[in-house]
Image (cartoon, helix red, strand yellow):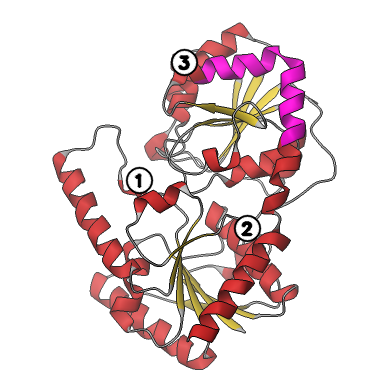
Amino acid sequence: MKLLYLTNQISGPGGLERVLSIKASYLCDQLGHEVHIITLNDKHDSIFFKFSPNIKLHNIHLKSSPIAYAHGYLQGIRKIIAEVNPDIILVCDDGLKGMLLPRLMGKTKPMVYERHVSKNIAVQSDSPSLLQKIKAKIQYTLMAWGGSKYDAFVVLTKGNLNEWKLQNLRVIPNPLSFAPGESSHDREKVVIAVGKHSFQKGYDLLMEAWKIVGPKHPDWKLEIYGKSNPNFSIEPLIEKYGLQSSVHLFGPTKEIDSKFLRSSIHVLSSRYEGFGMVITEAMACGLPSISFDCPYGPSDIITDGHNGLLVENGKTEDMANSISKLIEDDALRKRLGHNAKISVNRYKIREMGKVWHDLFLELANRH
């Protein structure tokens, strides 16, 4: 089939870009689909993750003014759809425009929407104002109106089903990005966290936990890999709590598997997630993962006490206790890590690719 993906960009180091690089490349190279990707104002000469060279890329250059942007967006997409004549159109855009696309331009082909984040992304504060709540409610209403027009609305976890009152929902988890044959084996006394610095990722909460763990276990280090953010810097908290010697910040890396393999524990401190792909990546390297039981994703992946530990969302003292528990109990840490590596086999790209392929066949036959 001809598959046409629409997303904002593929050049960056984010989770959506990583998932799309794995999935689109597999569908193209292994399952024989003809894959096209439309991006907006993207830089295809500096793509962070590896995409198959057989994928055909299309970039729409848009002007910054709202009216010109909207006009160029719809006209550019219509033009490429006419040229490619795809069998299925897949929208990977967590913004409002992506949700409304079938309403804005009409629908002549089967269309699939992929939701990669929780609805909670609209909330950027633990104590949102009344205006923020009203704005979010309006946004949610528009999202539901637009989302209902898709032939399939794909979410990543069972928990995400609770966010949407739609009849076209499907659950398809993110595929595992790698599956190394080796395991961590506690190579270094390192707790690792991965993700951009943002309100969502909750590194401020992680600092609250680490200020308890760090002094108690001075021979252990916390390493955080992710894109920095001047609007959500955690460096002041590191200085405030005197954690400069035990907390180390690094930028995004393409070799995150090697970082997992030299670590001993993975931690996820997010306030909310779309899935939590870093959990499956850490588990694939034989690391036990400790995560807040946030909406949504971690509880789909982690079975508490079997392949990792779940902590009540936002409870930083409980998070600190769980980290210390795994630091102090070598046998438990290794048992959870062993079980983790086995449990993520269900997320391998071969398994997820088949689910997507079957969905394409179903929609094409229905259309």
Magenta stretch, main secondary structure, is: helix
- Percent coordinates x, y for residue 77 in the rendering: 42, 82
Q: CA distance from mark 2 to mark 3?
A: 36 Å
Q: Could you say whether the residue bearing mark 3 is in a helix, strand or loop?
A: helix
Counting from the top left corner in percent of width and height, residue 193 is at: 59, 33
Q: CA distance from mark 2 to mark 1?
A: 27 Å
Circle 3 crowding by C-alpha within 10 Å: few under 14, some 14–19, many from 20 = some
Looking at the rendered structure, which numbered label has been put on residue 120? 1
Label 1 Cα neighbours within 10 Å, binned few <14 / some 14-19 / many ≥20:
some
Disc 1 marks a residue whose amino acid type is Asn
| Helix, strand or loop for disc 2 | loop
Instruction: Please tell me whether residue 356 is drawn above or below residue 165 in the rendered image.
Output: below
Residue at point 74% right, 74% down?
29
Q: Is residue 238 visible?
A: no
Give the magenta part as a residue range.
319-339
Residue 57 picture quarter: bottom right
First along the sequence among labels 3 and 1: 1
Q: Is residue 327 magenta?
A: yes
Disc 3 marks which residue?
A: 317
What numbered label is drawn on residue 48?
A: 2
